[in-house]
Amino acid sequence: MGDSRGGCCPPMDLFRSEPMQLVQLIIPMESARLTVAYLGDLGLLQFKDLNSEKSPFQRTYAGQIKKSGEMARTLRFFEEQMLKAGLSPSATSVAQTDIDVDDLEVKLGELEAELIEMNANGEKLQRSYNELVEYKIVLKKAGDFFPSAQQSATAQRREMESSQMGEESIETPLLQEQETSTDLSKQVKLGFITGLVPRGKSMVFERILFRATRGNLFLKQVPIEAPVTDPVSGEKMEKNVFTVFYSGERAKNKILKICDAFGANRYPFSEDRGKQAVMISEVSGKISDLKSTIDAGKLHQDRLLRTIGDQFEQWNLKVKKEKLIHHTLNMLSLDVTKKCLVAEAWSPVFAQKQIQEALQRASVDSNSQVGAILQVLHTRELPPTYFRTNKFTAAFQEIVDAYGVAKYQEANPGVYTIVTFPFLFAVMFGDWGHGICLLLATLILIVREKKLSSQKLGDITEMTFGGRYVILMMSLFSIYAGFIYNECFSVALDLFGPSAYACRDLSCRDAYSIGLIKVRDTYPFGVDPAWHGSRTELPFLNSLKMKMSILLGVAQMNLGIILSYCNATFFGNCLNIWFQFIPQMIFLNSLFGYLSLLIILKWFTGSQADLYHIMIYMFLSPTDELGDNQLFQGQKRVQHVLLLLALVSVPWMLLPKPFLLKRQHENRHRGQSYTPVQVTDDTLHSEANHSHGHEEFEFGEVFVHQLIHTIEFVLGAVSNTASYLRLWALSLAHSQLSIVFYEKVLLLAWGYDNIVILVVGIIIFIFATVGVLLIMETLSAFLHALRLHWVEFQNKFYEGDGYKFSSFSFALIHDEDD
């Protein structure tokens, strides 16, 4: 698309987005994949979807995308296995020739099957090993139950034989009734179950067993000293070894069900001490053999995972590229002959030669008999916006893009934001001590940027790291503003020479500036240190910072209106020049430009004129005499002229433009349809959404739109100027907070003759400075500077209704979230 710039002020290319063109590519089928791959390496094309009416499953390369997705799933499985084994993919893959996608699919499938089999075998072996470990513990612990139980039973039998039988209670357990029967020779033989139960469930386990069997059991538990790995869940947990003695099959079935419900693992056990020793020996041997087998399996699995890890990044990149290539191929249209693919894409004009070279290289490498064809299409569609940025300018451009992406070749606020944003921040944050702290923290991020850029950072840390160069500029400007204010942690220093003022007598020692006389030349740079600590300090800085805020605000708003003029001249929109730029400049500067002039004159002349009185009565009583408020000869006449211009500029903005637009529309459709149409920002936007047929002109709608625009500017000129006073308010707030922390914390602690109070005071001062002044105040000033740029500055010229150039590039492949 050719340049349509016109007017009297051709802007520099740095302030405009790159000229874009819509190109058509005709690619033979045999070289389509390689061509798209080379274009992805180039990263200078934004493909249009020519198959938007088709679902993803109806497209030509849906099968290849599914295959790439399956390979990506396999690679995620490998990554999970490596992380589980404590390994990580190698950052530098072993050099290997480019593997074919089909071969890679087969290889990944084989490796996945092998890993799954190894995991299954390993899980079985590990479960058997954990069961044997528990079994060994049961054999050792439960073996001690039976001798003590026999001794207890013998003693109990002797006691019962010697005692007389009393009247039995109805609550006496049945088991005890059998043991206390007179016919001891007919006692029932008891069965037993041994195992392990989680310690947290042991009390409930015992209570449920007792209730289920009505007390007809004997339960013995002993805790295990160290946690053991549960064979079922594979988790470490504390357990108790238990043995339950019971009578009858019915009681046994109940106990087994309760054991299953509580996750109690049961193991066979023999009463014979000899058999117990043999079983312990056998289990110990099996444990040793299983341990060796498991270790060998893990060693083999680690070797396999290390081999995968050496090639993981290369395979992962290959799979992602293939998925992205086929996704892009699905956006291309299949020719009727089904022998070639047709693509349409946006590209920067400067990239045409590089694209042609990539197409030729792909044709040669794919041995295609027919080369790809590139041709430029002429269109009235609005192109995407593309700014070439680097790591320094990218963050400033993101600040602008967060408000809205610039329309194609609209003036870019990001260029001015590089200077104006950190400067307005510094006006609010000005303290060179705090600025140096901020600078040191930023330099750490910049020095370590290579290491940090390759790491996974948290949300806040990543946001701070991304804006490191913005913070760098903010800290440098804050140091400069701190020298202007002569503030270092709220303390004034004689950095550029002694103060110009001295005490005439002892009367000036009471913190009043009365009695100060000028004894030497004016302090060369910034605020004189004598003004700090005096009772007049706050009124003086109030006046200075308030007036400076107005001057900065009016200057930046004038810059915004000038940029609207640059946009109008670039797009050849003469109506905006005559009925937007000129009346806006007149209105703004007739009022607030005049106020800025009065501020500067008052500074130079040292006059005591009341600027509030001048501006108010300029409207209320324009004919009254100025008296002591007169700053220059002919001021009254100048005010009359400026007031008249301000009043005339309002209908100038409102009335002519709708009527002229109506006249242009009538002329365009009265036999002049075939005349060349001048491409402006309005025509570009409208013709992208409407056909070339006759359109009705809604005069009422246009007039209302212009009325809203005029009212918005007139009211905005007042409110925006007042909004810049936030520079004054936040600057004073920052300064006063610094004074409070310095005087009421640090100096107060210093006054005590106590080392503990001094150390505590220093710690509180450091934390207050970092937490409040370096973090909260930085964030506050940042947000207010952001507001001033988005609302007060950019609304004068910036539409921000474009769309960003999203190139098909493999360079962005690492940012994809699978």
Image (cartoon, rainbow, N blue to C red):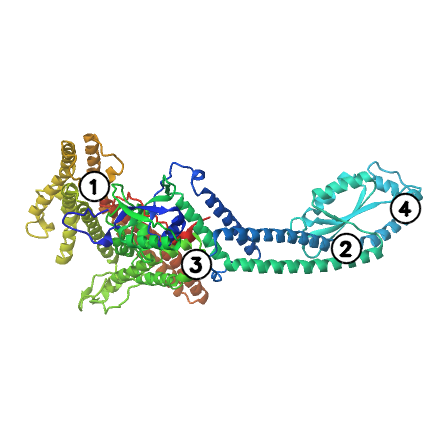
Numbered label attached to residue 141: 2
**Mark 3 to mark 2 CA distance (whole Å):** 54 Å
Indicate which disc, 3 or 1, sits on the residue closer to the N terminus: 3
The residue singled out by tag 4 in the image is 160
Tell me, yes or no, if residue 575 can be seen here: yes
Q: Few, some or many C-alpha atoms within 10 Å of disc 1 (few <14, some 14-19, many ≥20)? A: many
Q: Position of residue 242 (x, y in %)?
A: 76, 49
Q: Amino acid at mark 4?
A: Met
- Spatial separation of the CA atoms under disc 1 and disc 4: 108 Å
Q: Earlier in the sequence, mark 2 or mark 1?
A: 2
Q: Nearer the viewer, residue 728 or 203?
A: 203
Amino acid found under the numbered disc labelled 1:
Phe
Residue 454: mark in rendering: 3
Residue 394, image quadrant: bottom left
Nearer the viewer's eye, disc 2 or disc 4? 2
Picture residue at 22% right of the left edge, 45% below the top: 796
The amino acid beneath tag 3 is Ser
Using the image, tell me which numbered label, if any, was put on residue 713.
1
Disc nearer the start of the sequence (3/2): 2
State yes or no: discs 3 and 4 in contact (Cβ < 8 Å): no
Q: 763 and 20: which one is in front?
A: 20
CB within 8 Å, label 3 to label 2: no
Which one is earlier in the sequence, the residue at label 3 or at label 4? 4
Callout 4 environment at 10 Å: few (<14), some (14 to 19), or many (20+)? Answer: some
Q: Label 4 near label 2: C-beta < 8 Å? A: no
Q: Return the x and y of residue 353 as percentages of the image width and height.
A: 28, 54
Q: Secondary structure at mark 3?
A: loop
Residue type, label 2 = Lys
Q: CA distance from mark 2 to mark 4?
A: 29 Å
